[in-house]
Image (spheres, grey):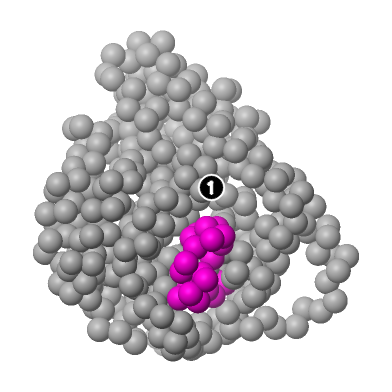
């Protein structure tokens, strides 16, 4: 008997909340925990561009044979163009290699496994705070985790000098995890000038940036949101990107993302990439095809791409509208505390500043579910549930 001594694992802080939400029988319950986009009707529908791409795929698909270890080639090319821009010298100089991988999570894990097993990197620096799964992914792969200062709760803003000061302690060869845009959970991103300084610091201290890019298009726009990544990529000789299409294509359960390596030249990129492929081979052999085929079909077809861009813009503007309405409704409910900072944050989340006790009361007394850190998924707010949420916040 070997299972009888296994200890119970704690529930995942975010997905565990969804389980508790599902079990709640109150009709007015609201789930603002997990980062899933909801439309005005509170649904997460399949994008119309995705439906059309799927219809096309059903017609032309001739085989379910295995993909290569690195997935759909057209997809990998399209990913590089989205990340670095069509005219990027990184692409022209063939310094990048991309492997389709299962979601942002799978991409981060493959990047971490590759680093641990093939390079001298042993430590990764993550922001304080960061997405909770970063710690789990990187420690599972065997990296040591250090944190750099990022957010000051009292000011609802970044302390950039403190960030630089923390990273000054990193040693040559350390990895720095950076959120490409729409920082999770704070919603506060670096300015282009700050990105430039981060690039300079990476060069000076020989640190390697690992971009987690899960929200391209949810901040200011597809191109706009890539400017931080492109600014740093133009400065450094080595870089890794783990990107996800869960949110911006609404392909959550298709598990579609990619890991991209940028090396000093094409020959080194090819050699390093051979080890990424070896890592993938021993993890899941090769990726599932459907998500990669959907994304590459949409990006290669001018009409579908235009439709996707429009659908993404709609999601972005609905979230921005909810932020404004959230701030206004809180004030209308008599909340005197200043929440105007919520309207200035980027992406799906808002770091509300609500305490653990307030979060617990929101759940227990009002059926409003948010993450213990006070992170609210603004993308889950609708005109219908806003009054419920704001009334509850006013009460606590
Ligand atoms: N990185 C960040 C910052 C995220 O917020 C998420 C999803 O919540 C991911 C990565 C993972 O995305 P995926 O669902 O594609 O694994």
- In the picture, which quadrant includes the C terminus? top left
Secondary structure beneath dot 1 equals loop
- Residue 157 is inside the magenta segment: no
- In the picture, which quadrant includes the N terminus? bottom left
39 and 264: which is toward the camera:
264
Eyeballing the image, is 78 above or below 46? below
Residue 84 pos. (x, y %): 49, 60
Picture quadrant of residue 152: top left
Eyeballing the image, is 351 above or below 10? above
Residue 12 pos. (x, y %): 40, 57
Magenta residues, start to end = 80-101
Residue name at image x 75 percent, y 83 percent: 65
Visible residue check, residue 165:
yes
Residue name at image x 39 percent, y 69 percent: 240
Residue 88 pos. (x, y %): 49, 63
179 and 283: which is toward the camera:
179
351 and 53: which is toward the camera:
53
Residue name at image x 59 percent, y 83 percent: 69
Residue name at image x 37 percent, y 62 percent: 234
- Residue where numbered disc 1 is placed: 222
Picture quadrant of residue 324: top left
């Amino acid at each position: 008997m070997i299972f009888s001594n296994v200890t119970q694992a704690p529930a995942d802080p975010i997905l565990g909340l969804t389980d508790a939400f599902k079990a709640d029988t109150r009709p007015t319950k609201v789930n603002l925990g997990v980062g899933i986009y909801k439309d005005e009707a509170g649904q997460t529908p399949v994008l119309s561009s995705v439906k059309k791409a799927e219809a096309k795929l059903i017609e032309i698909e001739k085989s379910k044979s295995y993909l290569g270890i690195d997935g759909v080639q057209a997809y990998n090319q399209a990913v590089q163009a989205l990340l670095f821009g069509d005219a990027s010298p990184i692409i022209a100089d063939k310094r990048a290699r991309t492997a389709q991988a299962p979601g942002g999570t799978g991409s981060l894990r493959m990047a971490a496994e590759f680093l641990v097993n093939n390079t001298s990197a042993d430590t990764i620096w993550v922001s304080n705070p960061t997405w909770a799964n970063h710690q789990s992914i990187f420690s599972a792969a065997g990296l040591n985790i250090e944190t750099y200062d990022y957010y000051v709760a009292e000011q609802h803003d970044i302390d950039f000098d403190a960030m630089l000061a923390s990273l000054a302690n990193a040693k040559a060869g350390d990895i720095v995890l950076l959120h490409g845009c729409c920082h999770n959970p704070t919603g506060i991103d670096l300015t282009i000038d700050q990105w430039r300084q981060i690039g300079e610091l990476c060069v000076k201290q020989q640190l390697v940036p690992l971009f987690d890019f899960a929200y391209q298009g949810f901040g200011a726009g597809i191109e706009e949101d890539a400017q931080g990544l492109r600014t740093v990529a133009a400065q450094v000789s080595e870089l890794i990107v783990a990107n996800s299409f869960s949110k911006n294509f609404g392909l959550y359960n298709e598990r579609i993302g990619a890991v991209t390596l940028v090396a000093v030249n094409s020959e080194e990129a090819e050699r390093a990439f051979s080890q990424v492929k070896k890592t993938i081979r021993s993890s899941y052999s090769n990726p599932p095809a459907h998500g990669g085929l959907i994304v590459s079909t949409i990006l290669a077809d001018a009409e579908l791409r235009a439709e996707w861009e429009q659908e993404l813009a709609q999601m972005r503007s609905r979230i921005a509208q909810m932020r404004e309405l959230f701030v206004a409704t809180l004030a209308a409910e008599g909340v005197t505390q200043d929440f105007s900072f919520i309207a200035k944050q980027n992406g799906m989340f808002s770091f509300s500043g609500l305490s653990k006790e307030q979060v617990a009361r929101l759940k227990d007394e009002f059926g409003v579910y948010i993450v213990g850190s006070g992170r609210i998924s603004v993308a889950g707010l609708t005109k219908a549930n806003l009054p419920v949420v704001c009334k509850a916040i006013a009460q606590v």
